Amino acid sequence: MTCVPTGRCDPRAFGDPRSPLMAAAADGIGVAVQKFFRGLALGAVLVFGVGCLGSAAVAAASPPAGTGAAAVPTGSETSSTGLLSTSFWLASAQGDVWNFGNAGAYGSAGGLPLAHPIVAITPTNDDQGYWLVASDGGVFTYGDAAFYGSTGALALNKPIVAMASTPDGKGYWLVASDGGIFSFGDAAFYGSTGGLVLNEPIAAMAPTPDGRGYWLMARDGGIFTFGDATFYGSTAADAPTDPAEKIVPAASGQGYWIEDQNGTMYPFGSAQGAPPSAGLMFQPVTPGDRAVLFAFAQLGKPYIWGGNGPVGYDCSGLALASWQQGAGVTFARVADDQYHTAGQAVTPAQLSAGDLVFWGNSQTDWTTVYHTALYVGGDQIVESTDGGVQLNSLGQWGQGDIMPVGRRP
């Protein structure tokens, strides 16, 4: 994708988009998700099975008695700086999947009539496929992901919230929100939090490199260790704005990354640099999340100068429609006015999902702003530009024209 940073990205250079003709395009914007996959036709393969091949019984998923202290230390070990993952998948509860960076497109459950929402996406060890998991433990396979069993036919005390693959890819664990563990294939059982009182529900699981232990991670980033898994830190004492979504082990097994739902990584122990590809569930929590989810639903629609939707958008039209329709927030229509007046200013370090980012010819003159986009997380944006509504990197054109602050409507 190429977009020449000129006034064509925003209609202000050519006329007033507030005209009746342009404004009429805003009528009838819907919230139905358009099933879009970058460069590939959508496909879905549904594979279900029953039975539990591991040693974790249904009783392991007993509900917590209430709220209380986490079973692992927190505080000083928390990383203060998030890294940005460049390759990951985002999936929605409806089964839609969006791929970022080098993460491949293998299919989705977006076109299926799901009985239960999708709650997890887990890549295979070679990143050539992934599993989607529903809240009842039903398993959907894509790419080179293999089916080893599910809890789809079991009566669960608590819903399934996560899956982790064994190191050799010949099995997996399903995890309930109370930390109950269900093992399939060659996955072994090493313990659970099913009998503990948790401050926050369990959100993710990751095995150690030798498969002889695993970490469980709570929604606030608290970490629980089993088998040969070691504790290296957590984000529970200083939880980020977006909920913790995934724990990704370092290759050495001597550390891990905690990743929030927008792709920001927090490294602990020996975890350094870019982490492996990860699959994340995008569950709207903040108004900005809801704006981003609306923008995702517009992926693939054409760039239309002065477009307010639903057929197509220009850059500022997408930004405004996403916040209006997704979060019920309104502000100025064109990019330079948005930069000048929309919400509050946020520094680059403070950017979170839905914040508006801008490009201009002068970093000190708001009237030179010519383009805007919605920040997603993980250094990624969703924007309408020459190639239509699409996912791209924030730094795709370099840093020279990026305005010094973003705006949070």
Image (spheres, grey):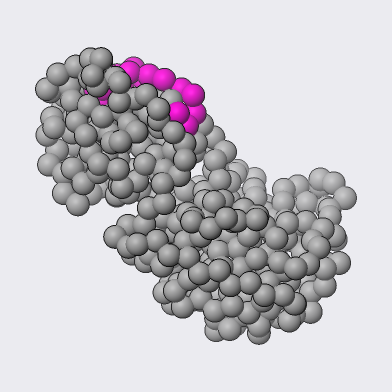
At a point 37% along the width and 41% down the height, the residue shown is 298
At a point 49% along the width and 38% down the height, the residue shown is 289
Label count reads 0
Q: Which residues are magenta?
A: 325-342
Above or below, 176 relative to 289 = below
At a point 54% along the width and 40% down the height, the residue shown is 284
Where the C terminus falls, by quadrant? top left
Above or below, 401 relative to 174 = above
Image coords of residue 315 (percent x, y): 26, 33
Q: Is residue 40 left or right of residue 154?
A: left
Above or below, 198 relative to 107 = above
**Res 167 seen here:** no
* Quadrant in the picture for residue 8: top left
At a point 48% along the width and 56% down the height, the residue shown is 111
Above or below, 376 relative to 64 = above
177 part of magenta stretch: no
Image coords of residue 322 (percent x, y): 40, 32
257 and 55: which one is in front?
A: 55
Image coords of residue 378 (percent x, y): 40, 50
295 and 377: which one is in front?
A: 295
331 part of magenta stretch: yes
**Res 19 seen here:** yes
25 and 61: which one is in front?
A: 25
Q: Is residue 283 left or right of residue 359?
A: right
Image coords of residue 222 (percent x, y): 67, 54
Q: Is residue 64 left or right of residue 374?
A: right
